[in-house]
């Protein structure tokens, strides 16, 4: 039996999952926290990458990697690791959720000519999280460091390079590269002019490997696959195929779906990510997801589980109560200065259970609107995988199929990014043209059945309030 391992380096932990390369069965797993993160604006902003190696070492203790023949790496996307000509770190790594590059993103957006120019160039617009915006921030705020930058790596690129023993060639994959803001999923090429526009000069960037291509072998002889970003690894770990979408309910919401070609959206609502299989993973994001439930739970003096229990006591439509969940503005639809709206207040609707359900329905209607953005561009959505913290709530699992209008798959708890990295490693080890078929174990599928009509009515009620409150949406 061949054994492969997946490493996922998230914002807080390094996780290792060891799998049977043929069946995908999880043989063992472990995790360890990263020491030494700093914060800016309430989010983890930067970290010494050596902390990742320390947490990797801690997670690997106790013979975790015994018998492993191949390793894949997943990591948080859109970070920035800047090194000098000798491969020495110029500064700590800048991470995805660092908000400081917001002004830099706005500058870059204007300098290339707006959203349409950026989406044509690289499939998406620069945001505070984009690697390209971090390069501009570095050039403006740390010009001496910026001048020293000879190469730019993403977190997973750097970890692969470390596992390989610091070879001359640096490598990445198309999935993670597609989030940088200087690699195009349409042409499959870097935009060196955008690198220079952001940093002031053109640094070296990694070679982009194919889905089943190995990055090389470690000094111990282990095959190291190309690796990928966390969203792409999760899609691989869940076994997504054409017609599948993922709705991820963290504080923010993301919807991405498997598609056979890149989607270039002139206004930038859709980001044209590539995936880890040779296909594409277009994504639409919302600002408001689990935070809506958290805020409502606090208002009702309960917790997430209590909110879920209350919501299930109400009925579809929440007795006419509608919550537009734009608590801090919204990205999809584009309402950056909006606030939330609570409509339909009557004596019989002013009860905790109806407000709780309105919060769940409002959050899911917002995600359904985001899913419709992809559908309207020809993306087939036959089933939805529900992930993220809020996706574990019973009320969300019960209501989501009604509002999303398709069967909803609820995966068993697991580190699917690490599983996806292990599956990629098994693929590279086998040298086959397609990824090994690993079944998704213990998942539950909830079919809306005849209740689809009920869900449509709830969404129509939501849309009426949305259009009345925001006529500018047309």
Image (tube, rainbow, N blue to C red):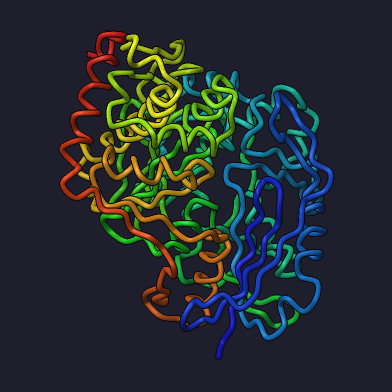
Q: Is residue 181 above or below residue 438?
A: above
Name the side, left or right, on which 380 lies relative to 285: left
Rendering quarter of residue 405 = top left
Q: Quadrant of the N terminus?
A: bottom right
Residue found at x 70% / y 23%: 41
Rendering quarter of residue 415 = bottom right
Residue found at x 42% / y 24%: 331
Q: Is residue 138 above or below residue 162?
A: above
Residue found at x 51% / y 17%: 328
Q: Is residue 471 above or below residue 392?
A: above
The spot of residue 125 in percent (x, y) is 44, 30
The spot of residue 173 in percent (x, y) is 51, 58
Rendering quarter of residue 299 = top right
The spot of residue 229 in percent (x, y) is 54, 53
Name the side, left or right, on which 116 lies relative to 142: left
Residue occupying the far bottom of the picture: 1
Observer-nearest of 216 and 280: 280
The number of discs equals 0
**Is residue 252 visible from the viewing direction of this image?**
no
**Is residue 270 visible from the viewing direction of this image?**
yes
The spot of residue 434 in percent (x, y) is 37, 74
Residue found at x 33% / y 58%: 445
Q: Quadrant of the C terminus?
A: top left
Name the side, left or right, on which 53 lies relative to 326: right
Q: Is residue 213 above or below residue 388?
A: below
Observer-nearest of 371 and 295: 295
């Amino acid at each position: 039996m061949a054994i492969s391992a997946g490493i996922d380096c998230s914002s807080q932990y390094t996780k290792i999952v060891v799998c049977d390369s043929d069946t995908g069965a999880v043989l063992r797993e472990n995790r360890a926290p990263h020491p030494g993160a700093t914060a800016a604006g309430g989010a983890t902003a930067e970290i010494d990458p050596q902390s990742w190696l320390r947490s990797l070492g801690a997670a690997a203790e106790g013979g975790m990697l015994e018998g492993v023949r191949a390793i894949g790496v997943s990591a948080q996307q859109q970070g920035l690791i800047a090194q000098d000509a000798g491969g020495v770190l110029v500064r700590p790594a800048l991470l995805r959720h660092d908000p400081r590059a917001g002004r830099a993103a706005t500058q870059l957006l204007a300098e290339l000519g707006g959203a349409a120019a950026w989406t044509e160039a690289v499939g998406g617009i620069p945001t505070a999280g984009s690697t390209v915006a971090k390069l501009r921030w570095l050039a403006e705020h740390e010009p001496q460091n910026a001048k020293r930058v000879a190469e730019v790596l993403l977190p997973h690129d750097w970890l692969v390079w470390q596992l390989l023993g610091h070879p001359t060639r640096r490598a990445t994959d198309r999935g993670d590269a597609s989030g940088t803001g200087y690699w195009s999923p349409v042409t499959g090429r870097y935009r060196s002019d955008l690198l220079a526009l952001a940093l002031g000069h053109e640094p070296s960037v990694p070679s982009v490997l194919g889905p089943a291509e190995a990055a090389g072998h470690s000094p111990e002889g282990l095959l190291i696959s190309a690796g990928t970003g966390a969203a792409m690894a999760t899609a691989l770990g869940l076994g997504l195929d054409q017609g599948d979408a993922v709705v991820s309910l963290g504080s923010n919401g993301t919807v991405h779906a498997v598609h056979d070609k890149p989607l270039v959206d002139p206004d930038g609502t859709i980001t044209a990510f590539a995936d880890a299989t040779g296909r594409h993973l277009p994504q639409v994001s919302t600002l408001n997801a689990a935070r809506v439930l958290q805020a409502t739970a606090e208002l009702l003096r309960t917790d997430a589980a209590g909110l879920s229990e209350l919501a299930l006591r109400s009925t579809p439509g929440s007795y006419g109560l509608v919550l537009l969940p734009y608590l801090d503005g919204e990205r999809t639809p584009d309402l950056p200065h909006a606030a939330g709206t609570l409509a339909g207040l009557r004596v019989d609707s002013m009860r905790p259970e109806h407000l709780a359900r309105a919060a769940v329905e409002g959050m899911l209607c917002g995600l359904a609107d985001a899913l419709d953005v992809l559908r309207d561009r020809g993306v087939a959505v036959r089933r939805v995988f529900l992930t993220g913290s809020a996706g574990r709530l019973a009320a969300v699992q019960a209501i989501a199929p009604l509002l999303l209008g398709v069967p909803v798959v609820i995966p068993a708890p697991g580190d699917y990014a690490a599983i996806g990295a292990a599956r990629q490693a098994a693929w590279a080890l086998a040298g086959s043209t397609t990824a090994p078929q690993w079944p998704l174990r213990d998942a539950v599928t909830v079919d809306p059945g005849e209740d689809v009509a009920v869900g449509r009515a709830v969404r129509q009620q939501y849309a009426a309030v949305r259009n009345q409150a925001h006529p500018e949406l047309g």
